[in-house]
Image (spheres, grey):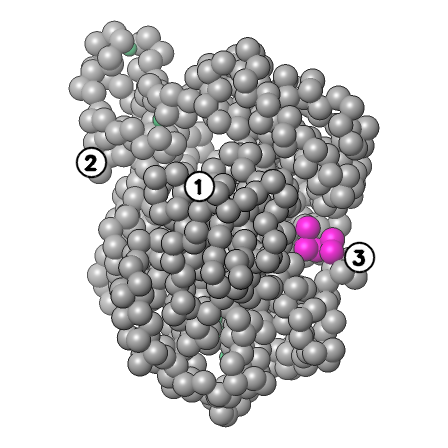
Amino acid sequence: MAFWPGVVVATPAHSGVGASLTYRSELSLAPGTLVRVPLGAREVLGVVWECPTEPPEGLTEAKTKPVAGVLDGLPPLNDRWRQLVQFAARYYQRSLGEVALAALPPQLRDLSHEQLARRLKRRAKAGAKTGAPAGEVADGHQLSDEQRQALDALATAQAPVLLFGATGSGKTEVYLQATQRALAAHADAQVLVMVPEINLTPQLEARFRERFEPLCGAGAVVCLHSGMTPAQRLSSWLAAHTGQARIVLGTRMAVLASLPGLRLIVVDEEHDPSYKSQEGARYSARDLAVYRGKVETEALAAHERCQVVLGSATPSLESWHAADQGRYLRLAMPARIGGGALPRLRLVDMNHQPKGAVLAPPLVAAMAERIGRGEQCLVLLNRRGYAPVLACHDCGWKSACPHCSAYRVFHKLDRTLRCHHCGFTERVPRACPDCGNLDIAPVGRGTEQVEEQLAGLLADVKRPDGTPARVARMDADSTRLKGSLEVQLATMHSGEVDVLVGTQMIAKGHDFRRITLVASINADSGLFASDYRAPERLFALLMQAAGRAGRDAAQSAASEMWVQTWYPQHPLFASLKQHDFPAFAVTQLAERLSAGMPPHGHQALLRADARTQQAAQAYLNAAAQAAVGLPHFEDVTLYPAVPLTIQRVANVERAQLLVEAASRGALQRFLSAWQPVLLASRSLPEARGLVRFAVDVDPLVI
Ligand code: ADP
Ligand code: ZN
Ligand code: ZN
């Protein structure tokens, strides 16, 4: 008897190939089985999607090729995983093969049968203990009332939970306890914990390992993120897929990992933009986590759930709105552990400061006072480098990137001009390249320059032991080398450094104990940006930064968040002053409602890259023309093509076209109908010079 498995292989996003390719097999292959199949002259990895006993219409034995090999050491990927992948491909308008294969570790493609068998054997030896971990609380402290209530509510919740907990309210402890409970309930239970950027928060990983390795064995916790080597990724993936790993800690890519025993999904800092992928299938890992929880729950017994917990001190307005509507269950933990207060907001009106001051004198004085008491300060700035641009004041030359419509940033330390978009780096020229003027000077400010200035301003300030104050910097440049982030965090934790200057990466999740003052020195750009999500991001960033101060309850009463602004009357600051995220959310959601913006409306972007801006826009406009009359065309609004804010990157011109709809369903159906039109439009004469196009559903930046 012959079988005709439909196999999904890595196909380019819009190759037009159907969902699966048909092969032949002597054996019946379970859906989800990993196979190797011939494709053209190559042999590629594929996933069996269905395995009928009759060939699809029009196919004969002569027209199909046999499956080349089966990875029979591995259990098939289960139905829920395939359902998740299928949903992601459909919702984000990509091919099934692209999403399915991208969710597998790349090294799986190159491994021979023997190599795979060897790895599985090695893994089996290193595997975690199965079975329920014993014991309740492992590290001694009593849960706070709020933590206890949240955990109790979590146990019975019939919807995804939005854990709205202030910074320092002990959300991580709730995740740990919920994890423990999920693992205790079933011998083969698994938990997925997602974080925005694992490298920035080594503490979280340490806490999970500390808690669960003694209970479940050394291999119980594995990580999954793009910073790992291919071999490490394969190893973690195999551990998760075979059930040997009980806890997977990962970034957005982990949402697509194979986890046959999945019983709990935690999405920490659920508002973080890095959960939205910006390339390939542009999926939201947070939204997929919610879908995944639903699919897993449907497959469980009636009284069981695969619970999803979305945690944040400043939830995304999408999740907040879902909780308003009752689709998510909101659990609030407003109090900080130990009863400490959140820092007091001090707005510095820059209109009343000495002209040209980067740091207002009262702020510098406040920092000096704290250093004198042995406390620490954080200074937050949204720009790395020394100064954004170098300019010639004689002829107006600026350090533009030759490949992008952006300026290169001056990095003083190695005297380079570096493009933060394409990476193009050059030595700083000795003189103005246009007019030869020797006096080219920095304009604007970056972290390096603020670090230098602060060191000067605090030069005479002494720590309690009489030694001079120390200023350090932490940003993407200072942490480029492997391990340097840990070293820099350690100097902060040990108290070696008094003032840390940095980009938003210093605001994220760190549990610094001795910080009592946090300052944001150039927040205003977030108040009036063209991007409608900018205030939401600014509010989250400032709340999160404020959360770094006063984490030690003994010092929290005296802790402060300073914000330098030219617009102290802005309503965003009024809510921030009260630490009142709900009030901020209400006004923002009302504004979004009146403008039909998400979450009250739904959006997608069609993006085009081309050799000329004209070609990029012409393709988009032609695709819009060709959409007339498609199903649900009346329910969507197509806007004219526009260039991106940074229009050219690495010599590619970029443009986009916004699609809006009141209903998600209508938008989805329109996009599906539009997809073949987008493919066909590539061969229109207007589209000459088009490099690629992509659809971004639920875009974060428009
Ligand atoms: P969040 O993630 O909400 O910002 P954390 O989980 O990091 O807060 O908790 C803040 C601090 O409080 C951590 O140092 C943590 O170890 C401690 N902590 C958490 N829960 C308790 C508790 N019930 N009793 C004492 N300390 C706790
Ligand atoms: Zn010049
Ligand atoms: Zn560039």
Query: Sequence-wise, which precedes: disc 2 or disc 1?
Result: 1
Q: Secondary structure at mark 1?
A: loop
Q: Secondary structure at mark 3?
A: loop
Q: Which residue is mark 2?
A: 414
Query: Sequence-wise, which precedes: disc 3 or disc 1?
Result: 3
Q: Which residue is mark 3?
A: 325
Q: Is residue 563 left or right of residue 528?
A: left
Q: Which residues are magenta?
A: 318-322
Q: Is residue 240 above or below residue 476?
A: below
Q: Secondary structure at mark 2?
A: loop
Badge 2 amino acid: Asp
Q: Are marks 2 and 1 in contact (CB under 8 Å)?
A: no
Q: Is residue 361 visible?
A: no
* Residue plotted at (64% across, 21% down): 623
* Residue plotted at (67% across, 71% down): 299
Q: CA distance from mark 3 to mark 1?
A: 35 Å
Q: Which residue is more in the foreground, 83 or 472?
A: 83
Q: Are marks 3 and 1 in contact (CB under 8 Å)?
A: no
Q: Which residue is more in the foreground, 90 or 585?
A: 90
* Residue plotted at (79% across, 33% down): 632
Q: State which quadrant residue 70 falls in.
A: bottom left
Q: CA distance from mark 3 to mark 2?
A: 53 Å
